[in-house]
Amino acid sequence: MVDNPDTTDDDKRPLDLRAVLDWLVDLPSKYSPGAIFVMYSFSYDVTHILRHLRFDKAWQIFKEETYDKDRKKRRKVQSRVFCGEPFDEFIMKYRNRKQLDIWKLRDPEHPFKRDENGNYVLNKDGRKIMDTIAHITLFDTHPFYQQSFVKAVSFLVKTGQAQQSDFDFMIEMKKKRGRFSLNH
C-alpha cells in the first residue's frame, strides 16, 4: 500500500505522484510471473496521475496525439511518451478505457540500450530499445462488465467468484470516499 505518512483519519494528505508511480511499477516484482493487474473504470485515476505532468505531455498520453494550438499541426502518437520533468524517469502509454503502461528508465539521461561498442540496440523493426528497470501494464476491466463496480462485485459474490466479506469491505470504503484528500 502507498500512503502519505502525514495522513490521519481526520486530515487526509495527498499522495506523492513519484511514490505512486514507483509503487505501481514495482508491483510485478511482488507477484508471480504472468500476474495480470487490473483496475475498474480507471480513467479518473489516470487523469489524476496525468494532472501532475506538463500539459503537453499529459495531452500526448491521454489523447495519443501531439499538442499544438493549431489543430492541423497535431499528429498521432503511436508509441510511448516520455513524461518529462519532473518525472523524466517514467514513460507512459495509455489506451483510453483499456490499458495503461508505465515504464521506469534505468537512467533518464540515457533512455535507450547500447551495446558494448556504444551503438543503440535495435528491435526487429529497427527501433531503439528502451533501457528500463521496471514496467507494469494495468488493464481496465469495466468494458467487460459495463456496469457499476458495486453491481459487478455483487454478481461475482452471487456466482461464488468473490467473497461476501470483500464486498462488505468495499461498501464500507465507498462510504468513506468523501473523506479522501485531493490536492488542489
Image (cartoon, rainbow, N blue to C red):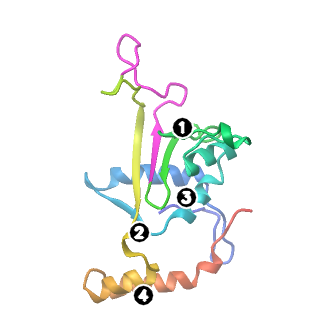
Residue denoted by label 3: 46
Q: Amino acid at mark 2?
A: Pro
| Residue highlighted by disc 1 | 89
Q: Which residues are magenta?
A: 100-121
* Element type at mark 2: helix
Element type at marker 1? Answer: loop
* Pointer 2 residue: 143
Q: CA distance from mark 3 to mark 1?
A: 18 Å
Specify which label sits upstream in the sequence, 3 or 1: 3
Q: Give the quadrant of the C terminus.
A: bottom right
- Residue furthest front in the image: 72
In reply to whether residue 114 is colored magenta, the answer given is yes
CA–CA distance between discs 2 and 1? 31 Å
Going from N to C along the chain, the mark reached first, 2 or 1, is 1
Mark 4 or 3, nearer chain start: 3
Query: Is residue 90 in the magenta section?
Result: no
Question: Alpha carbon of mark 2 to alpha carbon of mark 3: how far?
Answer: 16 Å
Residue name at image x 57 percent, y 51 percent: 62
Along the horizontal axis of the image, is 3 left or right of 34?
right
Q: Amino acid at mark 3?
A: Val
